[in-house]
Structures are given as C-alpha cells and as structure tokens.
Image (cartoon, rainbow, N blue to C red):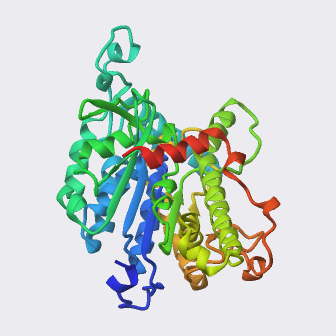
Amino acid sequence: MRRSQRSKSNSDNQLELPPYDEIGLVLQGGGALGSYQAGVYEGLAEAGIRPTWISGISIGALNTAIIAGNAPEDCVEALRGFWNTICQPADLIGHVGAWWPTTFGFRDVARKWSSMWAASRALTEGQKGFFAPRSPLHATGLARKNPSQVSFYDTTALRATLLKFADFDRINDGDIRVSVGAVNVRTGNLIYFDNKKMCLKPEHFMASGALPPGFPAVEIDGEYYWDGGLVSNTPLTEIAREYQHKDTLIFQVDLWRARGGLPGNFLDISERTKDIQYSSRTRAITAFLEAEQKHACLIKQLLEHIPEEVRRSHPLMRKAQQVAHGSAVSVVHLIYKNKPFEGHYKDYEFSTETLGEHWGGGLEDIRRSLGNPDWFAIPSHDIGFVTHDVHRQEAPATPTADTFNDVVDTSRLTTIEGFPADLVDDLSIGANAH
C-alpha cells in the first residue's frame, strides 16, 4: 500500500509525499555510529514518514528491530531507550582527563581524550546490555570450541536488550517488511532474513551484527552466521532488486564516507581503511542501478521502432516491454560526517556524549533533506533513477529530462560486464539467497 494513502499530513512538520508504491529505509552497519541513524529516523517520524520496508546490516539491523518492533508513536523513545542502555557516561578518569586540557583552553584535545578513553573502556569492559569480554582462555584460541563461543566478547546480553525494546510479534505481523543481512560462515554467501519469508527472532538480528573475531557466530537452524558487512555493508540491493515496476522512495543512511584525507600515520591508515572498506559498495551499487535504468530507457526507445503487431505477438518483444517499463526510484542519501576528534576507534566509542552528537547530526541532516520538497517528486520513468545528498553541493542530483529526449548513445551506457566481479556476485547472491 502506498505510504501517502496510509498517512495524511496532520501538522505543519509533516510532509505529504507523492503516491510512492514503496518507501524504503536502508541502514548500513557501523557500530557506535549507528545512533546517527536513530536521529535520522526521529526526523522521519517528525515528518510523518513511516517506511514500508527496512533493510539493515549489523548495527543497522539492530536499529531495524527497534523501529519495526514498535508502534509508530513509540519508535523514537524505544530507540532512545536502546541507545541509552548500550552507551555509558564518562567515568572519573574520563572527566578528570578531559578537565585539564579544557582548563587551559584546549577543548579539542579534551574532546579527543574523552573519546579515546571511552573507546578503550569499551574494549576492556564491554558495553552493558550489549557485549562483555570473555575469559582470557577463550580469547587465546588455544582450544577448539563451538563457533558460537570463539570470540573476544560474549553478546548474550544483547538478546535480552532486543527483547526489552522490540516486540517481535509486531516485527513478524506488522505492516513493515524487514530484511537483515548476514553471512553464512560455512558457504560464505550473504543472505537476507526476511519477515515475509520466515519468522524473525532476536538471533537473526544478532547474526547480522556478529562481526568476528570480536563477536561470536550465531547459530540459526543448524547454520552459523556472521556480520553481513563482511560481504556487503550496504543493503540497498535487497530493496532495489524488487523495485521492478514500482515507484520507490529510498532513504539510504550510511555511516562510512568513502571520501577522506590522506593518512599521516598508522592509526590514520586504520581509520581510512575502515571508511573505504565499509562504504565502497554504496557507490558501486547505485551506479549499477542507475545504469540499469538507462538500459531500460534504451530498450523503450528501440521498441518504438518495432511494429506494434510484432511487439504484441513476439514473446521476446513482450519480455523486452516488461524490462522497458522500468520504474522510478528516488534515493535520498544521508552520510555520517566524521568528527575532528574521532579516530580509528569511532565505531566502538559508545559514550553518551558522542551518542548525543551522532543522534543530533542525523536529525539535522534529515531535517535539511526534508527541507527540499522537490527532491521527493516521483521521477519520470524516462529518467528512472535519481539520488540526492544534502552534503553534495558541487552538482545537481537530478539529471534533466532533455538528456533522455535525444537518441541514447549506447557507447556511454555502463554494462554489467564493466562492474567488478565481486559486485556482480553480490547482486546474484542477494537475488538467489532465498
């Protein structure tokens, strides 16, 4: 059912959307950075926008459980409760260590100290309601154990936290489709657990965030699963592969930015490596989807030169018309912006101070995005695929319709053969995993 048919604008803050067939929310993995996604969702809730489909990886999967597992009016408070549970305030050492630089006017140094100390506490103490360090014997790997026990941390507490803040009956029977990605440890395949195809339990969401060797593999029906980000940290394909013939609006919330400065030391290299590793699929996938829409436009133009009788009677022509029909997809892209005080530890820095900053950043970015109502118009099917990013200033996001009024230059179209083999494999796995 179309989103605008389900919820009408009831206040000045709410945004009346065009009649999209689907409204997707795509949540990337990124550990402690995931509170940025909670801020984005608060802004969507303010505007009266309720996704019809949420797809998440890792921490994005945990946020997905909280959103889909609560009534619309309760989601923001449930998210706040979840994040306040797994984050912790600064201790005495953190306060004192930050106080000295602040006293002498070095606020940036103080902020970096408090962030580093909070991250070090997460490594040594774990996070309440989330994970706790295992005994040293387990961590050494000297003895072979069940895959669910081989990790530096125990995530048993996370199950109770999910049950506290998410109603799994609502997740499975509610009006939001849910897909969370995980990797089968034995086969190496990325699969999506989908509430339209199976009954989802806390273990499915925990599996999506089981990043080794920190977190243990999660057993589901005799198979073991790790974090889906090992194969693809961007679950956009799970929604996009089924958008055929549907007008779809997608809010894609990423926690890693591909662009960044040159590293100057080994710690910078560690941070930059994470940014590239966990963000690169986003650009590849959106480029592939855009190329696919251009191919549909080309086929549509070619069919105009085929006699109507042949188009109706020839089975190949009928298939070509189905492809040419295409769809209209608009992606509103929100990307977390790195803070000056952060380092390679930013994805396991769970302080309440940083939680507030991340959350506020997501809320600000979605409010700015929603302040561009023209972004939410359904694109022409001749264009098919557009993206918008509030931080991208150098070029307009939407191509002009005139671009497609002329004959398409096929030499400039990107084919699937031009994409890396691992991307093609990723798309194929996503399509055949079920």
Q: Residue at x 32, y 46 (%)?
A: 205
Judged from this view, the residue extending furthest toward the top is 142
Q: Is residue 222 left or right of residue 213?
A: left
Q: Is residue 291 visible?
A: yes
Q: Is residue 138 above or below residue 41?
A: above
Where residue 99 appears, as percent x and y from the top left, is 53, 47
The one of 102 and 316 positioned closer to us in this rendering: 316
The one of 114 and 45 positioned closer to us in this rendering: 45
Q: Residue at x 33, y 62 (%)?
A: 177
Where residue 121 appears, as percent x and y from the top left, is 42, 35
Q: Is residue 359 above or below residue 116?
A: below
Q: Is residue 131 above or below residue 396?
A: above
Q: Residue at x 55, y 81 (%)?
A: 378
Q: Is residue 98 visible?
A: no
Q: Residue at x 65, y 63 (%)?
A: 290
Where residue 11 appears, as percent x and y from the top left, is 38, 91
Where residue 202 appears, as percent x and y from the top left, is 25, 46
- Place residue 145 in its image quadrant: top left
Q: Is residue 395 left or right of residue 304?
A: right
How many numbered marks does the figure carry?
0
- Place residue 195 in its image quadrant: bottom left
- Place residue 311 in its image quadrant: bottom right
The one of 402 and 340 positioned closer to us in this rendering: 402
Judged from this view, the residue extending furthest toward the left is 169
Q: Quarter of the image containing the N terminus?
A: bottom left
